[in-house]
Image: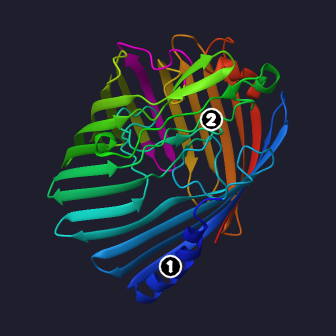
């Protein structure tokens, strides 16, 4: 267990903020998910997540955000020994984490936020070349979670212009699926395959991760340019005998993104170039998409690819890029107080592998939503989605808000 005093101090701090605040909001949810698989063990898996969220403004220029998750599962992919992993560097997800634990200041067109926070600089819906500051958790590759590093973020806005800069002093890589699970070498125990020790970048000025972006917002659209210097969140994975080794590669990335509004349509694009400072080949990454919406329907279709290189070479660790080139489709119908139905599909245009998900849910008694989802994967065994074609699953879920 790490930093238990942090949990003891949070309730006291929330009480003080609530008493002093001009405005304070709080709420939460409890979510239960039950997964069934036709093949592999365990065939039935359960996930549980409780969320508490608190927002307070003690002064017009001062605000605080706290969002904490408590999690458990039936099959041991979430740690039962570590309550909290402050740096999010462990191979196994801890039982609790902060999505937000931040204090903010605003005034004169400037907003500054200090603390744990998600810095998601994404424009497109599926592939994001500009989004490099926040690592991911792929414990369940079909249910990606964004992690929240300790960071400093400052935004300046004036009229149609904006500039934002962020610093992340301590690097954490994206978390891969558990070794030996159905998602990563299920027979690892029989083969004796284990993770080797990892050497993380030290917390020094030279290893400070930083990003800056500037944007202009017009009457019919918006455009931004951004730059990032730090480390690739996707670890480089190599195999030495029966040992898997992770390396963390220094990365420089520049990107441009934008969108244009045209009636019921929104056209979006995001592109960037990844330069690796270890001398390995860089590549470009892009996605274009079109979104059409007319209540209660929303439909998004897009295409993404890597140019001049392949992010999935070797043992693919960038799971959000491994299926490229690909076309994407998302169709959604429903409002918060009625039936919701969604279709998500990713189809690789080179290998023909695919992931298709269909979900539906219905609200009960105002604060409950129950639903089901089916995820189907297909393709040759050597393709990105095809290697998981035996992991088709059906999910039941129940979410209670309070």
Of residues 271 and 332, the one drawn nearer to the viewer in this rendering: 271
Q: Which residue is mark 2?
A: 141
**Which residue sits at x=23%, y=41%?**
224
Q: How far is mark 2 from mark 1, CA to CA? A: 34 Å
Residue 279, placed above or below residue 234? above
Q: Is residue 256 visible?
A: yes
Residue 79, placed above or below residue 390? below
Q: On the rendered structure, is 41 left or right of 93?
A: right
Q: Which residues are magenta?
A: 293-316
Residue 151 in percent (x, y) is at: 37, 55
**Which residue sits at x=53%, y=60%?**
98
Secondary element at image label 1: helix
The verdict on residue 353 being magenta is no
Q: On the rendered structure, is 272 left or right of 300?
A: left
User: Marks 2 and 1: which is nearer the front?
Assistant: 1
Residue 192, placed above or below residue 308? below
Dividing the picture into quarters, in which one does residue 198 lie? top right
Secondary element at image label 2: loop
Of residues 221 and 375, the one drawn nearer to the viewer in this rendering: 375
Q: Residues within 10 Å of mark 2 (few under 14, many from 20)?
A: few
Badge count: 2
Residue 141, placed above or below residue 192? below
Residue 195 in percent (x, y) is at: 65, 30
Of residues 210 and 25, the one drawn nearer to the viewer in this rendering: 210
Q: Which residue is mark 1?
A: 14
Of residues 52 and 367, the one drawn nearer to the viewer in this rendering: 52
Residue 275 in percent (x, y) is at: 31, 24
Dividing the picture into quarters, in which one does residue 315 lie? top right
């Amino acid at each position: 267990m790490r930093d238990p005093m942090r949990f003891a101090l949070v309730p006291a701090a929330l009480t003080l903020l609530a008493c002093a605040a001009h405005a304070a909001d709080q709420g939460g949810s409890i979510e239960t998910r039950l997964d069934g698989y036709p093949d592999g063990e365990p065939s039935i898996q359960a996930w549980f997540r409780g969320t508490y969220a608190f927002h307070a403004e003690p002064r017009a220029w001062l605000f605080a955000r706290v969002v904490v998750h408590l999690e458990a599962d039936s099959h041991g992919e979430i740690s039962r020994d570590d309550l909290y992993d402050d740096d999010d560097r462990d191979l196994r997800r801890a039982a609790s984490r902060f999505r937000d634990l931040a204090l903010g200041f605003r005034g004169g067109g400037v907003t500054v936020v200090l603390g744990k926070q998600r810095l998601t600089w994404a424009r497109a819906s599926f592939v994001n070349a500009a989004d490099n500051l926040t690592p991911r958790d792929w414990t369940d590759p079909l249910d990606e979670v964004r992690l929240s590093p300790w960071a400093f973020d400052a935004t300046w806005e004036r009229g149609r212009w904006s500039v934002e800069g962020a610093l992340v002093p301590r690097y954490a890589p994206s978390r891969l699926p558990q070794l030996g699970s159905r998602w990563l070498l299920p027979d690892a125990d029989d083969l004796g395959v284990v993770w080797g020790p990892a050497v993380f970048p030290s917390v020094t000025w030279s290893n400070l991760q930083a990003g800056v972006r500037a944007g202009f917002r017009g009457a019919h659209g918006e455009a931004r340019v951004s730059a990032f210097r730090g480390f690739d969140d996707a670890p480089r994975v190599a195999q030495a005998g029966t040992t898997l080794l992770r390396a963390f590669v220094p990365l420089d990335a520049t990107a441009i993104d934008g969108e244009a509004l045209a009636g019921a349509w929104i056209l979006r694009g995001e592109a960037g170039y990844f330069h690796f400072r270890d001398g390995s080949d860089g590549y470009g990454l892009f996605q274009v998409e079109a979104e059409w919406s007319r209540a209660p329907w929303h439909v998004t279709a897009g295409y993404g690819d890597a140019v001049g290189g392949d992010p999935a070479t070797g043992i693919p660790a960038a799971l959000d890029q491994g299926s490229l080139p690909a076309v994407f489709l998302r169709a959604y119908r429903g409002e918060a107080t009625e039936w919701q139905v969604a279709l998500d599909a990713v189809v690789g245009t080179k290998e023909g592998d695919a992931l298709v998900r269909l979900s539906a849910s219905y609200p009960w008694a105002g604060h409950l939503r129950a639903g089901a989802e089916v995820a189907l994967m297909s393709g040759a065994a050597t393709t990105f989605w095809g290697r998981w074609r035996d992991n088709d699953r059906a999910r039941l879920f129940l979410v209670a808000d309070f």
